[in-house]
Image (cartoon, rainbow, N blue to C red):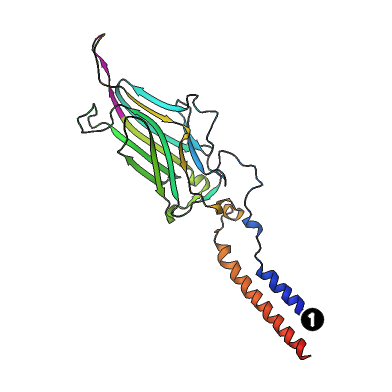
Amino acid sequence: MRGRLLLCLLLAVMLLVPVQAGDVTVMQNQQEDPKQPSANSTTLYLHHDGMNNAWTHFADNDTMDTEDGFYQEEIDNGLIDIDLRFRMNPELSKRLLMTVDGEVRGTLKMDLQGDWTNGDNNGPCNNDCDQLNVTILYGMNELYRYHHTSTTTGLQEIPISYRITEEQKEWDGRDGNPTVHITMKLRGDYRTTNVVFVSGEPASFTLYLGADSRIDLPIDESSWTEAFQAGEDPNAGEEDSPGFGLVVASSAIAMAAVARRSDDEA
């Protein structure tokens, strides 16, 4: 009888002690691609080869980057039409879960010259310019869009800040591949009338790359579990298992009490 009592008590203790299941083990043993997100790398960096190719990924350097460390367009007299799409390359290979109400924050370092404001009679723009626009997408879904009206001439850092909503929290691998889209139209009116006299100002757009232009994402820690990568709800186990274990443990304790009482009566 005492053996049965001991067995019931041992069962109760085992069921009350939390156990980490294999499907929630953090993915640490796999070889990580530095261009993909991980628990220690949650920042997107902008890259460009200085010609026609723009891309983004989670490493702050890339051998294909322009040696100058920036992308630039300039013109003495005329319009610069900036339309840059920094798509993640390689494509996102993992599912990501963002923290709801977590902050997407970042910085774009730029040097701007010329005119980009319509209707202020203070430059050559004639309803054909546009101020800086920044859009962040995941897949086909728009995450953030902002029309920056406070840009100034010269070197500056453009801030980015946005809070994740419930509807935007899941990024499903390649279907959630991130893109940073930057547009702007600037005009220059620099002229040389003769050897001595010049007028106006040239226009230029310079975007610094790598660590100077980045987006920090509020990726939830549960993104790195095997269960979430397999498509499971990371909260399902937390809601179901403890309650079940508590019921079974309570039953085991009750069995132990009955066994003890039978032993005493005997």
Q: Position of residue 123 (x, y in %)?
A: 23, 27
| Foreground of the two, 240 or 210 | 210
| Residue at 41% from the left image edge and 30% from the top image edge | 207
Question: Quadrant of residue 185 in the image?
Answer: top left
Name the secondary structure under disc 1.
helix
Q: Position of residue 225 (x, y in %)?
A: 60, 53
Left or right of 65 in this view: 126 = left
Q: Categorize mark 1 by other alpha carbons within 10 Å: few (<14), some (14-19), many (20+).
A: few
Left or right of 250 in this view: 150 = left
| Residue at 54% from the left image edge and 49% from the top image edge | 95
Q: Position of residue 20 (x, y in %)?
A: 65, 60
Based on the picture, tell me whether residue 209 belongs to the magenta stretch. no
Tell me the quadrant of the picture where the C terminus can be found: bottom right
| Foreground of the two, 139 or 80 | 80
Q: Position of residue 1 (x, y in %)?
A: 79, 83
Which residue is the site of mark 1? 2
| Foreground of the two, 112 or 174 | 112
Q: Which residues are magenta?
A: 186-194
| Residue at 61% from the left image edge and 53% from the top image edge | 226
Residue at the limit of the structure toward the bottom, as seen here: 265
| Foreground of the two, 158 or 246 | 158
Q: Which residue type carries mark 1?
A: Arg
